[in-house]
Image (tube, rainbow, N blue to C red):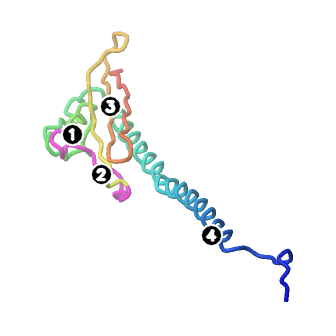
Amino acid sequence: MCIDRRRQRGLTLIELIIFIIVISMGLAGILSVMNVTVRSSADPVVRKQSLAMAEAILEEVLTKDFANPSGGYAETDTTNCSNRALYDDVDDYACFDGAPATAVIKGTDTLGAGAIAGLAGLSATVSVAATAVSTIAMKRVTVTVTGGPDTIVLSGHRAGY
């Protein structure tokens, strides 16, 4: 019996192995790109939370009086900065300078009704420095939030008008 090789159809073993290798390389490339994308997809959320925390603290500080009002509160506990709810002027926040390490605003230390658990890894320091802008006495407030993928630094000025 004579076999006609022209009519045979299908793949040889070598063609099948080459096909599997090519497909495997393509899948490996696609999966490695997806791995990088998925791993870094949460970073914008943490960055946005850090920025929101910095903005909230800066706004809190800048809404206080330029100088201590008569009979006002003066922060004396520079180790723990424990009386934040009583702060009534910008200089009271200078105790959150990060020295010692407990002198920071933790992400969970909100002045609202409850702590925000997602901010537990964040902490903020506040720097208050006297400055002058066009001969007007001002205080420059700088808020630095750390703990996320980036360090967020926001600054603002408070004048005594």
Dominant secondary-structure state across the stretch colored magenta:
loop
User: Which of pointers 3 and 2 lies earlier in the amino acid sequence?
Assistant: 2
Of labels 4 and 2, the one closer to you: 4
Spatial distance from mark 1 to mark 4, Cα to Cα?
62 Å
Of labels 1 and 2, the one closer to you: 1
Of labels 1 and 4, the one closer to you: 4
Which quadrant of the view contains residue 20?
bottom right
Amino acid, disc 3: Thr
Residue of label 3:
142
Spatial distance from mark 1 to mark 2, Cα to Cα?
15 Å
User: Which of pointers 1 and 2 lies earlier in the amino acid sequence?
Assistant: 1
Q: Are marks 1 and 4 in contact (CB under 8 Å)?
A: no
Residue of label 4:
17
User: Which of pointers 4 and 2 lies earlier in the amino acid sequence?
Assistant: 4
Of labels 3 and 2, the one closer to you: 3
Rendered residue at 32%/49% (across/down): 122
> For the residue labelled by badge 3, is the local secondary structure a helix, a strand or a loop?
strand
Report the span colored magenta.
Answer: 98-118
